[in-house]
Amino acid sequence: MTMPSKTCEQILTDISGYLDGDLDATACETIEQHCQQCSSCAALVKGLRETVGLCRQAGSAPLPDAVRQRARESVRRLLERGPSRPSDAE
């Protein structure tokens, strides 16, 4: 396995800001140019962009009533049990 180049390391450092739109135009251009030459970074950016999109879509979808009810029941049972003690985990 080859070590990532300094530019790849910079991409990894800046990728969150790039995907969130927090970087300036010059930094974005640098990442885009690098991804044209580096298939590994391009695949990473593409995969993360898709993941972010799916997470945003999932966050806006309403939960079915049955799922919401099961979650409430699970929380209620946990609260009734009280805090677990170290001996409970064994």
Image: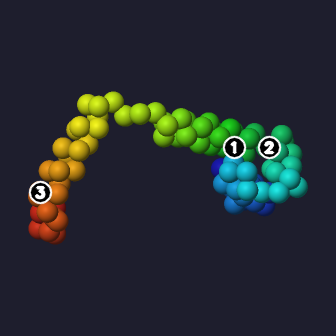
The amino acid sitting under disc 3 is: Glu
* Residue 18 x/y as whole percent: 73, 52
Asked whether the residues under the numbered discs 3 and 2 touch, taking CB atoms below 8 Å apart as contact, a structural biologist would say no
- Cα distance in 3D space between marks 3 and 2: 52 Å
* Tag 2 residue: 35
The amino acid sitting under disc 2 is: Cys
Residue 76 lies left or right of residue 6; in this view the side is left
- Cα distance in 3D space between marks 3 and 1: 44 Å
Q: Nearer the viewer, mark 3 or mark 1?
A: 3
Could you say which is closer to the camera, residue 67 or residue 10? 67
Query: Would you say residue 15 is visible in this rendering?
Result: no
Q: Quadrant of residue 71?
A: top left
Could you say which is closer to the camera, residue 84 or residue 12? 84
In primary-sequence order, the first of circles 2 and 1 is 2
* Tag 3 residue: 80
Q: Secondary structure at mark 3?
A: helix
Name the residue: 14% across, 63% down. 82
* Tag 1 residue: 45
Q: Is residue 82 above or below residue 47?
A: below
Name the residue: 11% across, 57% down. 80
Q: Quadrant of residue 14?
A: bottom right
* Residue 60 x/y as whole percent: 49, 37
* Residue 17 x/y as whole percent: 70, 56
Name the residue: 17% across, 54% down. 78
Q: Secondary structure at mark 2?
A: helix
In primary-sequence order, the first of circles 3 and 2 is 2
Q: Mark 1 Cα within 10 Å, few/some/many (few <14, many 20+)? A: many
- Cα distance in 3D space between marks 2 and 1: 8 Å
Q: Nearer the viewer, mark 3 or mark 2?
A: 3
